[in-house]
Structure formats: C-alpha cells, structure tokens
Amino acid sequence: MNDMKQRIYIALWLLCSVTGVWAQDDLASRLDTLLKYNLPGGSEVGISVYDLTSRQSLYAYRDTKLSRPASTMKLVTAITLLARSDSNRPFRTEVWYRGAIVRDTLQGDLYVLGGFDPEFDDQGMNALADSVAAFPFRHITGRVYGDVSAKDSLYWGSGWAWDDTPASFQPYLSPLMYHKGMVEISIQPGRAKGDSVRVEGTPSSTYYTLTNQALTRTPAEGKLSLTRDWLENGNNFLVKGNAESKVVRQLNVYSSQDFFLHVFLERLFARGLSVPGGYACAELPSDTLTNRIGAWECPVQTVLNQMMKESDNLNAEAMFWRIGQLATGKKRISAGDCIGEIRKMIRTVGHDPAGFKIADGCGLSNYDYLSPALLVDFLKYAYSSTDIFRKLYKALPVAGIDGTLKSRMKNTKAYRNVQAKTGTFTGISALAGYAQTAGGHQLAFAIMNQNTLSASEARAFQDKVCELLTTLP
C-alpha cells in the first residue's frame, strides 16, 4: 500500500513537472512572438520574469542590458529603505524656541527643524502654529529660522532636466517642504465671451502672485497657458490665452523652505503673534537655551503609498534622503551617502554595484542605469520578507483599479492581477512588479522599453506581456 502511494506521488510530481515545462516553453514562445510583432518599431526592450512560487526563472530577454529606469527606480529606493530595521521611524517636523520667555514676550527665536516630510500640508502647518500659539507669549523679538542643514543646497537631483521646471513633478528639494512645494491654480471662465477669467491659487499665500491676462471663450487670444517666471526664480504665476472651460493645473514654486517659512509666519500672524524679524534659515543651536514646542509626524507607509500609487517624485526623494540619514546617523548628509546605501543593497541582492549607475531616488535623472534582472532581484528580495512585501505590495498600483495603472489592462486577465510600478520618461517606458497567474503562482517581472517614440505603444506592449503572464496555469 505504501509502495502504491509512493508511485502515485511520483507520477503526480512528474505530471506537474512536465506541465510546468510545457507552460514555460509556451510562455517563451508567445513572448517571443510578441517581441517579433508588437515591439514598437526602432525601440529596444529588456524583460525578466521569475516565478516566486516555484522559484525558477520563466523568461529572460536581454535582462542584463542596462536601461534608464525612469520611475521604476522608486522600487529600488523603497526596498532599500524598507529593508532597514529602523524604516518605520516617521518623518518628523519640529518647532523649537531658543531664549527666555518674559511675560508675553519670547526674547529669542523660533526654529523649525526639517525632517524631509513630503506630505506636510495645511493640517501639519496649522498643528505647528497652534502649538506655538499655546505657549505664553505673543511677541517674538528675534526671527523664525528654518533648519534645513540636513541637506546640501543642491535643490535638484543630479542629472535632472532644468527645463522640466516649473512642472509640479520636479520639486525644489528641502528638509522643509509644504504642499509638495507647488501651487494648484484654478482657472474658471466668466459668464460671457470676452470676460476676464477667475483665477485662484491653493494654498492661498502672499508668497506668490497671480497675473491674469486670460479671457473667456475668445479664440483670438490663443491657447490657454499657465507658467511662472521660473528663469528668474520668481513666483509670479501668469495666466493668458483663451479659457473655454474650468482648468486646474499645478506648478512648482521656487525655494521650498522659503515657501514653508513664509506660510508658517502667516499662520502665526493669524493667531495673534508678532515676529518683526521675519524669517531666515539657520541651524538650531545645541545648548541649554533650546526647548521643543511641538512636532508633526507622518507615517512612512503614507509616504510610500503616494510615492508608488501616484509616482510622486518628491516622496521618492524624501525616502532617498531618509536612507542616508538613518544609515549614517549624521545630521548633514549628501546624495553620496544615500547612493552608497543603495549600492550596498545592490550587493545584498546578488549584484556588483559597479555594474550600475545610481544618481537619485526617483528616476528623474538622466544618469540612472539599471537592468530588468536587477529590478526582479529587488522584487524577489522584498517578497522573501513578509514585512517588506506587505508594505510594498499595499502601495503598488493595481491594474485597472488605481494609481498610474488605473486606466490600464481593463477587460483583460491582468485586471486586478498585476501590481506594479510604472516608469515613463522621454523615450522610456518601463513596468516592474508582481503578477498573479491563473494557476495561483506569484511572479516578479520587469519590462524596460527604451528608445520608444510612442509611450502608448510601449504601454500596450507591456500590457500584452502582463496578460500572458496572468493566464499561465
């Protein structure tokens, strides 16, 4: 009887093995066909597919070829941070005072200590202002200082394109960031043709100005445009042209820390405090005269979700700099500190870091170079840790449901069965993440299209690959 059972088990094992080989061969054949007939003309691609359930490579095509990752770089940044034992420490912004409180006057200064919180918004700003207003003084003889000493003065990442500003996706980096360093401009046409349009900015602040030259339903005025005097590092937003319907757009503002401090001072004024000295940037002294007033924290998962779902560059760079902070324990860090930790992680997942180029944390840089094989090995590493995988998987866009995959793979087998990070840049389109097969296997994959003039064609190719992966038995 035992011998019979053993024979049955062996037969079933052989059947599953043969089925697996057939499925793998069939996948390779179908993917090769896709490459032949559906790859955008003149472009190149690297593909790596790994079965996490059966622990075997399913497909590789130029998987070690170096490519610019665009926003799939965010996977490397996120996994490097999540792999740390102290990765759960929240992003923290603090307010301190230095001096003496005499009756209703602070004879000294306020300090706001930046912690790279990319999600710091009105709720955080009001909370910090309220914490100051709760103290027994109404006058401050000195200034409000922003301590941004944790980062060097290079507000753009290495290899970023200067003419991407004033787009909101290219922020001015600082340890103090408010409203993602951008303003949302709402343009509303008037009632009649030729009327001036109504223009409003959010958040409201005197830090920037609005110049409105647009007219309602007047085609002779030309196409509606919104920009700011970014070549002069100014913050005057200019609206001109023809407005046919309501439009909402976002532009970055120059100097994140100044935007933060200006609005913070406005909120203090609104609460009845006077600060005749205004604001500036300086490091918080370490002495007995300093006392903490309050703090605002943001969970890492909140930053990660926005970073992945919406491909938020500011959030990715905040994580990038957080890696350097946690790893070195230094107050002053450089991009080199952050890159060094990612290079260590590349070695941890089994690759020689000398074979790749890391320049930033979000993929905006023209100098980043990774490979599909490297991305898949990062995904494999994340999958091997329940804690890392749970946090990462929760944050990734879901095909046809949300984030940057909201409009993709609908009405296909990949719908809801792919959770992956997109990457889009001029001439580049990439997709890397996880796919669930029809047979219940979990796959890790990376598709890196390069030199493609049509992003839509590259995305269509990637979607077809994902559909094939999710139909596997």
Image: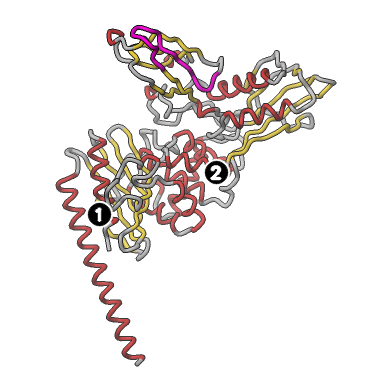
Amino acid tagged 1: Leu
Please give the range of residues in magenta. Answer: 188-204
Q: Is disc 2 surrounded by few (<14), some (14 to 19) or many (20+) residues within 10 Å?
A: some
Task: Tell me if label 1 and label 2 are in contact, CB under 8 Å.
Answer: no
Check the image and report above or below for 448 versus 290. Answer: below
How far apart are the alpha carbons under marks 1 and 2?
Answer: 34 Å
Check the image and report above or below for 149 versus 463. Answer: above
Check the image and report above or below for 433 versus 204. Answer: below
Amino acid tagged 2: Val
Q: Quadrant of residue 227?
A: top left
Q: Secondary structure under badge 2?
A: helix
Q: Quadrant of the C terminus?
A: bottom left
Q: Quadrant of residue 377?
A: bottom left
Q: Is residue 136 magenta?
A: no
Q: Is residue 375 visible in the rendered structure shown here?
A: no
Front in this rendered view, residue 153 or 403: 403
Could you tell me residue 323's position as x and y percent? 53, 42
With 276 as the anchor, is 352 left or right in this view? Answer: left
Front in this rendered view, residue 417 or 7: 417
Q: In the rendered structure, which disc, 1 or 2, sits on the residue that comes first in sequence?
A: 2
**Residue identified by numbered label 1:** 468
Could you tell me residue 398's position as x and y percent? 38, 47
**Residue identified by numbered label 2:** 300
x 23%, y 36%: residue: 452
Select label 1 or label 2 by which is in front.
1
Could you tell me residue 179's position as x and y percent? 53, 28
x 60%, y 29%: residue: 149
